[in-house]
Every structure is written in structure tokens, then in C-alpha cells.
Amino acid sequence: MRSTYDAQNFPQNFGFGHGWVEGGPLLPVKTEFYQSGLGLEALRALASLAKLTGKDDVGKDLQAAFDRQRTAFNQAFWSAERKAFAFALDQQNRRVDELSVLTTVPMWFGVTDEDKSESTIQQLADADHQTDWGMRVISNHSPLYNGQGYHFGSVWPLFTGWASVGEYRYHQAFPAYANLRANALLALDGSLGHVTEVLSGDYYQPLSTNSPHQIWSAAMVVSPILRGMLGLESDAQSHTVRFAPHVPADWRSFAVNELRVGNNTLSFSYQKTPGMLTLDVLRTGSKSEDCAVEFSPAVSLRTSVIAVELNGHSLPFQMSGGANDQHVTMRFSASQTLTTIRIRLKNDFGVSLANTLPPLGGASQGLRVISESWNSPRTQMTFGLAGLPGKTYELLVWNPSEITSVHGAKLTNGRLDQAGLTVEFPAASAEPHESYVHQDVTLTFKGAK
């Protein structure tokens, strides 16, 4: 990789081969954001390997190189005008300001700046990039776009899965879950368990040149679930598991079984009831080997944590928040066969959306949640949505009693702990067409003046 470095220490494509994009109007370029991001993560991985093998001096040098290059990477590819990461740098080191789903790949590893990543993801979440069946390579508004273009308009489940993991890492749960569901539903549509390689960017149908079952497409059902939505990481050296889930609001329970950590195996059982999150951890394996768990579930910015209990006793916890959610984090030793964590909540709240696939050959018609924002006292929340004119959509609200008023949508009757949120997009002035329009929905909560 170092043999391909340019003067800025970015790995080059031009003159050596190509990056991910193999042909088409996006080329030629010197280096892709995708490739340079992977080169950056390679430095960090090598630093970790050097440390594990006792080469501390080599590890320090590699880590220092990573730190320097990370800053340069985030600056060189950032477009302040478009408020997004660029697809590539051309042969004159100028940014190629084409917005592409490929920019989400370095986000998988967390090497991108958080604010820049959030801005990029929100643009990629719009309907010109995200179809009902996955992510287009580039926007269908781009002059370079072709829905049949292998690397300049088509939808790859591989890219869709990459986007989902990156979106979850930066707490953008709505587009992340939409992409995860799209890939999961592809595995259940048609020949069961087979996930196609590449689909049209215009209609829900595979390209004629696609492979009907691609292993990396299938992998992008598994990784977005485990690494993305569940936020699972295990470290055999330190005997530690990190479990940081972004759970959809309508999920009341799920289980994760047979997670290996060194010589131990852990199984997690998660349950949600109004005002309470419960995690049961079942441990089997070596009794002499310690096993630590860091549990860090995402909750609404409106939610308060009253207490956390470990097997009925108080357990210290920390709160950390961003623009879209907050995480309650605790660390404990899974020293017993069964360990139970209970998190007591106040003002718990959530909204979820379960997207579906269109009929084979159909165009996109599902709702897009592009953004969510809160006011500073957490008494008002606004969703930025995209939908088709004249179409009605429904989201699900967890704990609707927290809401005092809705603007831009209607709450529908439901159970005490959940209800529907119906959003109606006005019909277009001309004949109905398949062009998405934008609309905001604002929820006002108890305590607002």
C-alpha cells in the first residue's frame, strides 16, 4: 500500500490499477475516499497488531501516522459547499464532489469526523440515493447517473450493508434500519436465502449482468445486524464484550445466542416494557477466566434513567448523548451463570418505521426519514421526511402518552404503550408522478410551554 502513496500519503489508484469503481463516468480519479479510508484503517490495524506482537516502537510509529493521516483525510475529501464527503480526488488533487454511498465505507471503522459524517448521511438518506431495495451508487439527480450503470447508478446490497453499519455507528438509526431491512427482505424474496449481486437503480429488479447469489451480499445481512444495529464487539485478549444496540421502538424483545469471548460463551436476552429495559446474560465456559460486558443501549434524548440494577443491586452508569440519541453505559462482570441488568426509565419514547419492498419491477414508493432534530429542552422533536405526493404513510410511536400535540401528521388510536403516526403527503398539482417531495412532522411533548 505504501508503494502507491502520493505526496499526501493517500494510496493512489491511477497508474496502479483501480479502486472499487472499475469503469464508467466516475473515472479516472487518483484516489477514492473509499480506498483512502481503508488505507487509514489499515494503519490503525497494523498498530494494534504490532502492539499485540510486542513491537511497541513500530506500533507507536504506526499509531502516530494514523493520527496525522486521519486529520488530513477528513480535510482533503470534505466539501464545505456541499456539506458532504467527496467521492474522490482527481489527478490534480481536486475533489470530485459527487456524493456516493461509497463514502459510508470508512464510516464503518469510525475514521471520519462525526459532524461531517452526519451531514453526509442525511443527504444519502434522501430518496434520490436510497431506494426501497437499497442504496444507489450515486444520486439519480446526477448527470452521470444511469439506473443500469454497474458502477454509476445501480443498487448493490453490498453498498447498502456498508451504509447501514456506518449509519448505525454515527447514530443515524432510521436510514440504517431501512437499509438493514432492505437487505434482509431481499434474502426472503425470490429464491429464499439467495441475495442478488446488483439491482437496477430505477426499478426493483436485478440487472441482467448480475450474479443471482453473491456471498458479500448475504454477508451484508449479517454484519448490519451484529455490528450495526446490535453494536456487538468482542475482544478475546481483554475478555470483553461491548453491546451497544440501537433497538427499533417497536421491538419488545430479542435474543443473541452463542457469542464467543475467549473461552466463554455468552447469550443475551433483551426485553422492553414501559419504563424498563431488562438484559439477561447467560454465561457458559471457563469459570477461571473473567468475562466483562459493557452494555450501552441507545435511548431517546427525552428519556431519563432513574436507576440501573445488577442482580437487584445498584450499578453505576454513565450517560453520553449526541444529536439524535443518548446511550446509558454500564460495565459489569458476567461472573455468574445468569446475570440480570434492569434499567429503570422515565419519559421513555421512540418512533419506528418498517419499510417494505415494492412488487418486482416496481419503483420506489416507501417513506424516507431524512433527519430528526430536537429543541434544547427536549420538549419538541421534528422529523424531516420524504414521500410520494398523494400517498399516506404510517410510523409507530412507543409511549404516545408523552405527546401533547402533533403538527404535520395525526396520532391514531392504539394500545396504551404504542400508537400509529399517520403522515399524509398532499397530492401534486399536476398528474401524480413518482417524484418524492419533502415534509416535516413536529411532535410536542409534556412540559412544553
Image (cartoon, rainbow, N blue to C red):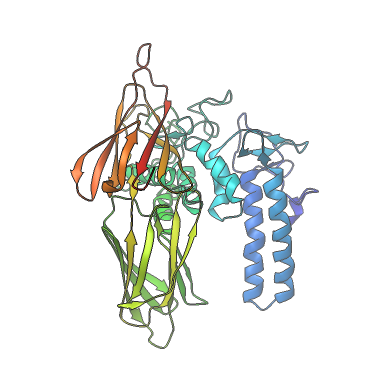
Q: Nearer the viewer, residue 141 or 154?
A: 141
5 lies left or right of 430: right
Q: Where is residue 396 in the image (x, y as percent from the top left)?
A: 28, 43
Q: Is residue 102 above or below residue 246?
A: above
Question: In the image shown, does 372 or 154 lie closer to the viewer?
Answer: 372
Q: Residue at x 44, y 60 (%)?
A: 327
Q: As rendered, which of 129 and 325 lies closer to the eye?
A: 325
Q: In this view, does 60 lie to the left or right of 191?
A: right
Residue 227, percent from left and from top? 45, 58
Query: Which residue is rendered at x = 43% and y = 55% of the image?
Result: 223
Q: Give the image location of residue 447, x and y in percent.
A: 36, 48
Image location of residue 165, percent across then percent down: 47, 51
Identity of the residue furthest to the right in this view = 7
Q: Is residue 272 above or below residue 80?
A: below
Residue 187 visible to the viewer = yes
Image quarter of residue 370: top left
| On-image quarter of the C terminus | top left
Quadrant of the drawing holding the N terminus: bottom right
Residue 189 can be seen, yes or no: no
Q: Residue at horizontal 53%, vertical 53%?
A: 108
